[in-house]
Image (cartoon, rainbow, N blue to C red):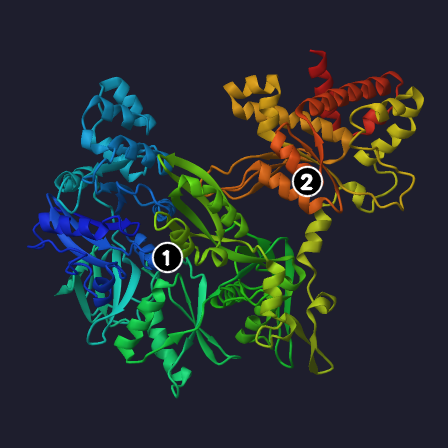
Amino acid sequence: MMKKLVIGILAHVDAGKTTLSESMLYLSGEIGELGRVDKKNAYLDNYELERARGITIFSKQAIFNRGDTQIILLDTPGHVDFSAEMERTLQVLDYAILVISGADGVQGHTKTLWRLLHMYQVPVFLFVNKMDQYEIDKIKVMKDIKKQLDDGCIDFGQSKTDGFYEELAMCDETMMETYLEKGQIQIEAIKKAIKDRKVFPSFYGSALKLEGIEAFMQGIDEYTMRPYYPKEFGAKIFKITRDEQGNRLTHLKLTGGNIKVKDLITNGQEKVNQIRIYSGEKFETVNEIEAGGICAVTGLTDTKPGEGLGIEKDSERPALEPVLSYQMILPEGLDPRAMLPKLREMEEEEPELYIVWDEQLQEIQVQIMGEVQIEILQSLIHSRFGVEVLFHDGKIVYKETIANVVEGVGHFEPLRHYAEVHLLLEPGEPGSGLKFKTACSEDVLGKSWQRLVLSHLEEKKHLGVLTGSAITDMKITLVSGKAHNKHTQGGDFREATYRAVRQGLKEAKSLLLEPYYEFQLELPEEMVGRAMNDIEKMHGTSQIIQIDGEMSTLVGSAPVITMRNYQKEVASYTKGLGKLFCNLKGYEPCHNPEEVIELIGYDSERDSRNPTGSVFCAKGSGFSVSWDEVKEYMHLDSFLKEKEDSLKPISQKEAPYSQERVISLEEIDQILNKTFYANKGRKSDWKKSSIVSHYKPVDYVSKKKERKEEYLLVDGYNIIYAWPELKALADDNMDAARIKLLDLLSNYQGIKKCHVIVVFDAYRVQGHQEEVIDYHNIHVVFTKEAQTADAYIEKFAYDHKKKDKVVVATSDGLQQIIVRGAGGSLLSARDLKDEIENTNEIIKEIYKELDIKGNHIVDALSPEIKKRMEELIKKESE
């Protein structure tokens, strides 16, 4: 039985993806003549627009056989503006081919594709193209691929050699054991490692000259596994199109069972009229298709890309979403309401296209990925509907999220209606979108009502309260609700749910987000300074990753709005030598939120279509209650308040006087100031120590005096390498050195009571978001990608210089100058070490003094503090 595989081919634009597709089809005998992009006769670029521009815009398929393998090849767009079309295709692939230009290496969009392939867990074969070009160093290219993508990228052109097996063995423990035992690795183990994404076979050649293509195709045949499919029916829809006669085509992959003509497959409601198997422009009709196959069916009118049928679940929205919004200008006399249904037809075919009807402005707005789509969209509208449209200057698509946890309450109770909904709104991970779930007892609200609330959460684009932009990166949980036995109708919960979201947003600390590009800029070395200065002005970050002869490469990220036209500027000041590659990185906090909020001028409380308040009933009539008073009228208890009460420590609750109470750290300080230091005369010694030069003891008598918060920021790696004992530890085990430093600072904070923040660089970790971790009583920050510890500390010092006292511990000379300029104080690595040692001595003496005098304050300490002090004394005595 022939092995059937669905393989997608992906690449950065101009890497040679279409040429490779042509070569594979030609050598397999599927086509009799090689097509070329520059000659506008490529087999798969069969749309006029694609041939005119020389790029792939729409994903298409071709079928060919190689050995015992039938390959259904899905060609995807390479241009970033059409990424959503590509991303939908990833969800139906068994394997992927990632094409990399040997001349250009790994580009920005290549890394975006790599992350998406990881996200969808698609096994990958690499083909490094254009190796026929002059002076390309294969070894150098391979090192770059390993460095920027994965160490598991292995040259399969050297297969079955000792070096090949050694590289494979390093990718997987099982293969390592086999290699050590037998000196080689069985092909089945290699196939499994590829399927599990531990190994990524890499092949080299030239698609244009048919070099290396045979070996590549042989490798796919030899190192792929037959997919398993269940008997139950399942299908994943990845695309909607229309043929020349206007028939609606639903493109899907069958992931279980089979489909026959006249089968009812969309919840038993719609019938399959025809099954088509496409290869290029041509297709053949069949009566039945089995699992593993790709087909287009007619007869389905309500399907959409990403929808799952049968045992398949619906896909989440694509990770890459539109970031630009354009107003569509229609010809005079054409009613936009008449044009809107036609555009909706196009919208379901193009996943990266969002059509928005603005009721207030009575205009059509189009949200897209990039400006290349504008020309494509104008051409498609003209060819399909005969309408010439124009577009106004594009605007950025902003989004909103929240920075704290709140409970939103919505109540809807006009006469003979009733529903109350309580939602917990929590910040989500960057890029996570919206996540909905329920944590409500069925004793409180019936299961059917809970499902209804979730469906209302999912059906609407909820708007933020800063600019009216869509909300994202949040977890929304149904935690409580109430219905009425007689008066509740389905629409009541819709109103209550929408109002609960908006009421919660009004209470929350909202953040405005804007899209960011990650970029790679190649330019002459002498122009690097100019480029870095430009990027800083654009509120971006950058770093040099490569200097190759007279050329340098900068990478980093910056807001889309500030970088939109920078390619033209680069071309100008580098006289055409510079190249800028941009990819959408995602949404991050806006660099100028106040300016944007003022410019948009959105008033959340006057948005009648998205009310923030609720409706209650009294004396037989309904009345409106503003968002800030809803919780005074609500019928159910607050979920958050009950939770907070249950988690309060005993000392914060009303408890009987006879109950034992844990003494707080603040109270310990008061007692120490009044007793120990006074009795021993150590209070004056304390003031003379280097500690007090930066941190004074709290004045507990004068409570009216406003005191500043005190922060100690520690440049983690700088301190580790400045202290000999930590450096020696780091050379052997960096994690151990970090923990040792954190333990020392944790003890220090126990006495000093300042806020200690230890900052570690994570800017070289690809895709890393800023991470804050609480370690005992101190905070640890790992910076986001493209941000150094220096940059984080400088920004923190600047932001807090007016209202707080900030001390920075570092021995970096340049950073010390910057911190002084930002208004912060300094501790050298040596001074910090002295302070910590002095603090440890003080802790020892306090503990011994109290113990000797029989002062039972030690017994009043919380178990955690007591344990930490005992551990410190033990360590010091050893």
Q: Report the side of 77 relative to 773 (left or right).
A: left
Amino acid type at mark 1: Lys
| Camera-nearest residue between 801 and 120 | 801
> What kind of element bears circle 2?
helix
Query: Disc 1 marks which residue?
Result: 313
Q: Nearer the viewer, mark 1 or mark 2?
A: 2
Residue 259 lies, in percent from the top left, at 21, 62
Q: Is residue 825 above or below residue 510?
A: above
Query: Disc 2 marks which residue?
Result: 821
Residue located farthest toward the top when viewing the structure as drawn = 878
Residue located farthest toward the bottom when viewing the structure as drawn = 333
| Camera-nearest residue between 639 and 736 | 736
> What kind of element bears circle 1?
loop
Residue 427 lies, in percent from the top left, at 58, 53
| Camera-nearest residue between 15 and 569 | 569
- Which residue is found at the position 59% from the left and 28% from the top? 718
